[in-house]
Amino acid sequence: MTAVQPDVRTLLSPGDPAAIEQLVRDTGFFSTDEIAIARELADDGLANGPASHYRFVIAEQDGALLGYTCFGPIPGTRSGWDLYWIAVRRAAQRRHLGRALLEITELAVQAAGGTRLYAETSSRAQYEPTRAFYLCRGYTVAAQLPDFYGPGDDKLVYSKLIG
């Protein structure tokens, strides 16, 4: 498949929280609670703009949301940042959009003085492509918390030195 060439922006527009909620739901990866959290962060980002703790990279084509990241500085650290969300519409997956979104996010973190980006995911088999994605992008496993999400479902924290 060919790479997707979307329009990219960092400021949320009024329709983004609903579009983000729907995109996250449509991936089939996330629980009802996780979908609500994705919406909550987008609502906060829209309501508070640049004053929000949450930053976004939005990729769209012809006005339709194709993917996004949500990230922010980790309170109490000098230069650590969390990648809270990265999600790509199913039809745009495997076309390098996730990679492009992550690269733009890493550059934004670096420009803001961040030196390390953390991403977490589940150990469930469903998340094998996600784990492979982080490893291919230069992330390493920094921590594994057994049974974090539930019995047999560990939390894996990936880390990458930025810059």
Image (spheres, rainbow, N blue to C red):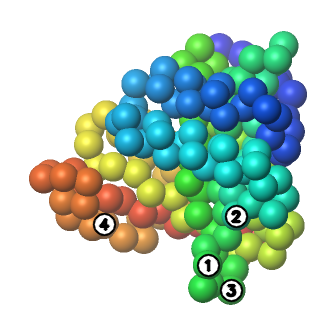
Q: Is residue 97 visible?
A: no
Q: Residue at x 47, y 62 (%)?
A: 158
Report which quarter residue 139 is drawn in.
bottom right
Instruction: Tell me which numbered mark, 4 or 1, is placed earlier along the sequence.
Output: 1
Q: Which residue is mark 3?
A: 78
In the rendered image, is residue 120 in sight?
yes
Q: Is residue 35 left or right of residue 97?
A: left
User: Mark 3: which amino acid?
Assistant: Arg
Camera-side residue: 5 or 44?
A: 44
Mark 3 or 1: in front is 1
Q: Are marks 2 and 1 in contact (CB under 8 Å)?
A: yes
In the picture, measured across the screen, residue 41 lies left or right of residue 64, that is left
Q: Which residue is mark 1?
A: 75
User: Residue 2 got which mark?
Assistant: none
> Is disc 3 placed on a helix, strand or loop?
loop
Cα–Cα span, label 2 and label 3: 15 Å
Q: Secondary structure at mark 4?
A: strand
Name the N-terminal-most of marks 4 and 3. 3
Marks 2 and 4, Cα distance to the nearest angstrom?
26 Å
Residue 96: % across, % down: 67, 30
Residue 149 spot, x, y in % from top left: 26, 54
**How busy is the neighbourhood of tag 1: few (under 14 within 10 Å), some, or many (20 plus)?**
few
Neighbour tally class for label 4: few under 14, some 14-19, many 20 plus, Cα within 10 Å: some
Q: State yes or no: discs 4 and 1 in contact (Cβ < 8 Å).
A: no
SS for tag 2?
A: loop
Q: Residue at x 26, y 43 (%)?
A: 124
Query: What residue is drawn where x is 71% and y is 41%?
Result: 101
Q: Nearer the viewer, residue 78 or 53?
A: 53
